[in-house]
Image: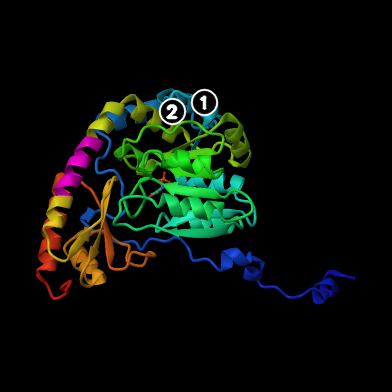
Amino acid sequence: MNAEEIALETRAMTGTDFVREAVRAMSAYTLEPRVARDKLDQNEGAFDLPGDLKSEIVQRVLGRRWNVYPDFEALELREAIARRAGLTRENVLVGNGSNELLMIAMATLVAPGRRVVIPTPTFPLYEKLAVIFGGEVVRVEVDPRTGLLPLRAMLSAAAGGGEPALVVACSPNNPTGGVLAPGDLDALLASGAFVLLDRAYGEFWDDGAPAPSDRLVTLSTFSKAWGLAGLRIGWLESTPELCGEMRKVKLPYNLNVFSQEAALVALENEPLMRARVEETLRERARVISRLASMRDLEIFPSRANFVAFRVAGDADALFAGLAERGVLIRNVSRYPGMSRCLRVSIGTTEQNQRFLDAIADALAGGSDRSAR
Ligand SMILES: Cc1ncc(COP(=O)(O)O)c(C=O)c1O
């Protein structure tokens, strides 16, 4: 048979027919590009790195050869991260944002049919990745009013199948702001579950580093408290054995020279990050107390650098009214369990003030696009 005859015998398939069913059924993780004076929609750290530290990073990068690959193992950075946590570099992997490490962890741990317990609403990427890798997602409802993740429901969902489940816990949780209470992580691990703990906002909630376990992977990022979202750097901590398995999945040279140097400089200046976290926490208290004094808003407790709240009226209209006033926040009202909810990141004092003024004005019906 020649090629044409073989083609005639084969069922015709278009390009997208080759796409896996699980992927075709998904929607993409997207963010509508919007320009605003005050961007308080993505929970980035409020403060840029000071100019002198940026210059130092650039100087270090200028001193490196760009025609050679970066350190294959990112040894210096992994060492520096491990030292902070009293671990060894074998306990640490670094990646192009914690998103990349989340993908690596899911690809390593989620076999087809494995149950993945996801307290919801939460960061949407967990469910997307679990589905891509063939996991069976078990959603557990998070009540944003409690300020906590629902331990009991998580435990019973984890125990529900034949074999122990993978439990994803985002603490503090995006977008609700709630946390795992002290002791809850131990309870989850004691149940036999494997826990993927996302500590992206961990610096804002000083719950201490979790005790090591051979069924625990934690994810952290330089994108939030450390103020380096633009450079895409994250890290993962686990046992040397699990890190060894995940290293098989990770692509080589995933962290470039610039990012590695920037993260090292950030770590050398950790007191700066701590001071900025303190300032963000002070501002969070101020924003919450002002919002709480406004009629028709229900504020949810938050341990992170953002605050979610429910609007008595039309959340879409309030979101649009804020955007008209130059303040972009996040409309999370289509997240499960978050009807009529919005989420605002804590910015600088000036940004927060403009947000508070804008929302007071919008709620008072200060334009045609009234929120009520
Ligand atoms: C819970 C959570 N995890 C991870 C990330 C992404 O982190 P990174 O920038 O390190 O990829 C985000 C970003 O918003 C997040 O909210």
**For the magenta stretch, what is the residue range?**
277-287
| Residue 97 at x, y percent in the picture | 44, 43
SS state under label 2: helix
| Residue 37 at x, y percent in the picture | 20, 55
| Residue at the (66%, 73%) spot, across then down | 14
| Residue 46 at x, y percent in the picture | 25, 44
Q: From what the image shows, is residue 341 above or below residue 164?
A: below
Q: Which quadrant of the structure image shows residue 319? A: bottom left
Q: Tell me how many marks there are.
A: 2
Residue 94 in sight here: yes
Q: Quadrant of the C terminus?
A: bottom left
Tell whether 290 sits left or right of 91: left
Work out whether residue 48 or residue 249 is closer to the camera in this orientation and state it.
249
Q: Determine the CA span between mark 1 and mark 2.
A: 8 Å
| Residue 350 at x, y percent in the picture | 13, 48
Residue 97 in sight here: no
| Residue at the (51%, 23%) spot, across then down | 88
Work out whether residue 158 or residue 245 is closer to the camera in this orientation and state it.
158
Tell whether 96 sits left or right of 294: right
Q: Amino acid at mark 2?
A: Ile
Asked if disc 1 and disc 2 are in contact, CB closer than 8 Å, the reply is: yes
The disc placed on residue 224 is none
Residue behind label 1 places its C-beta within 8 angstroms of ligand 1: no
Q: Which residue is mark 1?
A: 89
The disc placed on residue 81 is 2
| Residue at the (22%, 47%) spot, across then down | 347
Dot 1 or dot 2, earlier in sequence: 2
Q: From what the image shows, is residue 227 above or below residue 82?
A: below
Principal secondary structure, stretch drawn in magenta: helix
Q: Amino acid at mark 1?
A: Arg
SS state under label 1: helix
